[in-house]
Amino acid sequence: MTAPALAPFQPSLFDVTDGGPTFDALTGGPRRRLLSDGAWVDLHPNWLRGADHLMRNLTMAVPWRSERRMMYDRVVDVPRLANFYDSSTQLPDPLLEQAISRLNAHYGPVLGEPFATAGLCYYRDGSDSVAWHGDDLGRGATEDTMVAILSLGATRSLLLRPRAGGPSLRFPVGHGDLLVMGGSCQRTWEHCVPKSSRPTGPRISVQFRVQGVR
Ligand SMILES: O=C(O)CCC(=O)C(=O)O
């Protein structure tokens, strides 16, 4: 089902760049947090500066759809809108092509293959969310991989917890931030974006993955 009209994005007062959008260099940039079982997370705040136009364009240009997803052996409704771009589909904004090239230049040598697909999700407000899961449909269930998330719009918390049990970690992801989950993260840890009871504007998450991981 195609989504109804979406709320307009309120541009950020702090996201002003003179020469248009720019990506920060990734070399030496992201702060890596090592997790248990060979999992890790890189966080690069403000990776994309001047992201307002991208947020606005994706809001309008992506044919957002209600989402259903396999979780815990069942197909469930996910309270957010989404669209998936496989490697043969043109991405909805040239900046996403730039993002994928930069990620491949930085992470490719360790990842051993390119980021190839983009999953886009639209969280309309704080009542949209995604439940605990790992991206373990496909090769993520058995192989180390990376999932790189560019966050746009409202700041939301992305939580991670070890599958073996233990406390969760909270990563606030804001406008232009990059978060990369790597190593065994998709099979030994789970992540979620919980609902928020605070007044929360729209957020878009762009997840870059390798072929064969969802
Ligand atoms: O919203 C996010 O950044 C996380 C999205 C996610 O975990 C997923 O779609 O698998």
Image (spheres, rainbow, N blue to C red):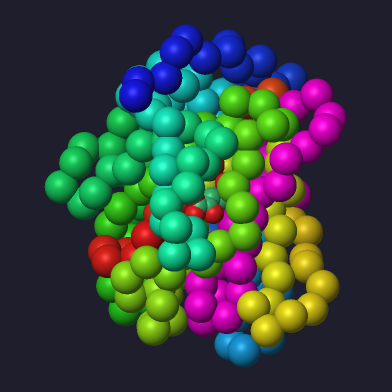
Which quadrant of the figure contains the C terminus?
bottom left
**As displayed, is residue 132 above or below residue 98?**
below
Residue 53 shown in magenta: no
Near-viewer residue (95 or 83): 83
- Hey, which residue is sitting farthest front in the picture? 74
Determine the residue positioned at 28% across, 37% down: 91
**As displayed, is residue 113 above or below residue 99?**
below
**As displayed, is residue 148 above or below residue 48?**
below
Q: Which residues are magenta?
A: 172-200
Determine the residue positioned at 59% across, 87% down: 38
Near-viewer residue (12 or 163): 163
Q: Is residue 193 left or right of residue 78?
A: right
Image x and y of residue 98, in percent: 36, 44
Q: Is residue 109 left or right of residue 34?
A: left
Image x and y of residue 109, in percent: 36, 77
Near-viewer residue (124 or 178): 124
Image x and y of residue 107, in percent: 43, 69
Q: Is residue 152 left or right of residue 89?
A: right
Which quadrant of the figure contains the N terminus?
top left
Image x and y of residue 210, in percent: 32, 64
Determine the residue positioned at 68% across, 77% down: 162
**As displayed, is residue 15 above or below residue 33?**
above
Q: How many marks?
A: 0
- Residue 13, located in which quarter of the rendered image? top right
- Hey, which residue is sitting farthest bottom in the picture? 37
**Res 35 seen here:** no
- Residue 33, located in which quarter of the rendered image? bottom right
Determine the residue positioned at 51% across, 78% down: 187
**Res 157 seen here:** yes
Residue 183 shown in magenta: yes
Q: Is residue 119 left or right of residue 40?
A: left
